[in-house]
Image (cartoon, rainbow, N blue to C red):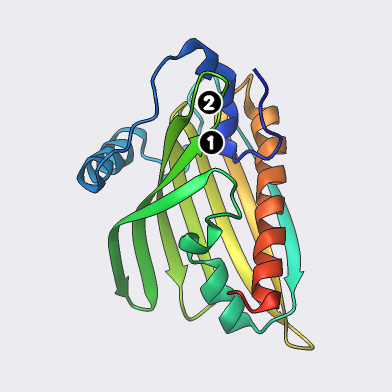
C-alpha cells in the first residue's frame, strides 16, 4: 500500500492499520458527527493533558514558524478559520461546527474535520474531533483534537506583528499516541503542518484569503 507523503498526524497511524480494515467511506450526518464528537470528548478527554501519561503512550512536541506578508488581524482571521484549510490539507473535505460561542473575548468552537484518504482498497473517511479556542484580544488560539487510533493532538498557535506589515505565525504542536508510533507521528505531523502553512501563506499573500 502506497501512503501519500503529506499526511496530517491523525492520518498517519491510521494509514498503517487501514490495510486490515474493510470499512468503506461513509458520509455521516451532522447529527451523527455531533454525537461522535461528544462521545470522544467524554471518553478520551482530549481537552486535557494527562500527567502522567497512561502506560504504553508517549508525547512529543515541536514548534514551527512562518512569516506571512500581511497584517496580523487579516492573517489571524484567515489562518484560524479551518474552512480555509480545505485544499491546503489535501484530504480535508469539509468541517462541521457543532458549537460556536464567544464569551469574554474567547471564541470556543467544537468541530469535526472530515478527511477522505485515498487507498488502493478504496477511500477511507476519517473524522477528527476537535475543540478550538480563539483569544480574539491576544491574537492566538489553541486546539485539542482526537481521531481514530486514539491519537491526541494539542496545538497553540500565536500571531506576532512584525515590521513591514508582516506576521510571524508559530505553531506549537504536541502529539500523543502509542510508544511505537510517536516518532513517526511527530515527524509526519510536523511535515503536514508545514505544508498547510505554505499554502495558507500563498493564499493570504495573493489576496485569495
Give percent across and percent down for residue 32.
23, 40
> Mark 1–mark 2 contact, CB under 8 Å?
yes
Q: Please state, as top left, top right, bottom left or bottom right, where the C terminus lies in the image.
A: bottom right
Per the image, the residue denoted by label 2 is 14
Give percent across and percent down for residue 129.
39, 44
Residue at x-position 43% and y-position 29%: 148
Asked whether residue 61 is in view, the answer is no
* Distance between mark 1 and mark 2 Cα atoms: 7 Å
Per the image, the residue denoted by label 1 is 10
Above or below for 185 versus 166: above
Closer to the camera, 194 or 24? Answer: 24
Mark 1 Cα-neighbour bin, 10 Å: few <14, some 14–19, many ≥20: many
Give percent across and percent down for residue 78.
54, 72
Residue 24's tag is none
Q: Give the left or right position of residue 30, taking residue 196 as reference.
A: left
Above or below for 5 versus 70: above
Q: Please state, as top left, top right, bottom left or bottom right, where the N terminus lies in the image.
A: top right
Helix, strand or loop at label 1? It is helix
Q: Residue furthest right?
A: 164
Residue at x-position 45% and y-position 68%: 134
Q: Quadrant of residue 28?
A: top left
Helix, strand or loop at label 2? It is helix
Give percent across and percent down for residue 106.
39, 72
Residue at x-position 61% and y-position 55%: 88
Amino acid at each position: 500500500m502506497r501512503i501519500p507523503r503529506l499526511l496530517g498526524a491523525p492520518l498517519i497511524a491510521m494509514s498503517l492499520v487501514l490495510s486490515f480494515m474493510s470499512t468503506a467511506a461513509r458520509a455521516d450526518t451532522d447529527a451523527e458527527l455531533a454525537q461522535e464528537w461528544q462521545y470522544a470528548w467524554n471518553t478520551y478527554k482530549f481537552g486535557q493533558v494527562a500527567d502522567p501519561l497512561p502506560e504504553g503512550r508517549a508525547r512529543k512536541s515541536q514548534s514551527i514558524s512562518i512569516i506571512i506578508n500581511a497584517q496580523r488581524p487579516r492573517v489571524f482571521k484567515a489562518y484560524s478559520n479551518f474552512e480555509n484549510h480545505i485544499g491546503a490539507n489535501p484530504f480535508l473535505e469539509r468541517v462541521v461546527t457543532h458549537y460556536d460561542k464567544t464569551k469574554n473575548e474567547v471564541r470556543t468552537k467544537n468541530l469535526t474535520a472530515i478527511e477522505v484518504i485515498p487507498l488502493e482498497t478504496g477511500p477511507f473517511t476519517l473524522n477528527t474531533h476537535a475543540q478550538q479556542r480563539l483569544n480574539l484580544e491576544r491574537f492566538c488560539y489553541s486546539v485539542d483534537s482526537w481521531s481514530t487510533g486514539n491519537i491526541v493532538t494539542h496545538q497553540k498557535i500565536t500571531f506576532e506583528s512584525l515590521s513591514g506589515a508582516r506576521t510571524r505565525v508559530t505553531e506549537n504542536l504536541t502529539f500523543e499516541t502509542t510508544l511505537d508510533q510517536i516518532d513517526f507521528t511527530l515527524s509526519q505531523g510536523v511535515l503536514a503542518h508545514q505544508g498547510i502553512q505554505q499554502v495558507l501563506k500563498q493564499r493570504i499573500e495573493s489576496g485569495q484569503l
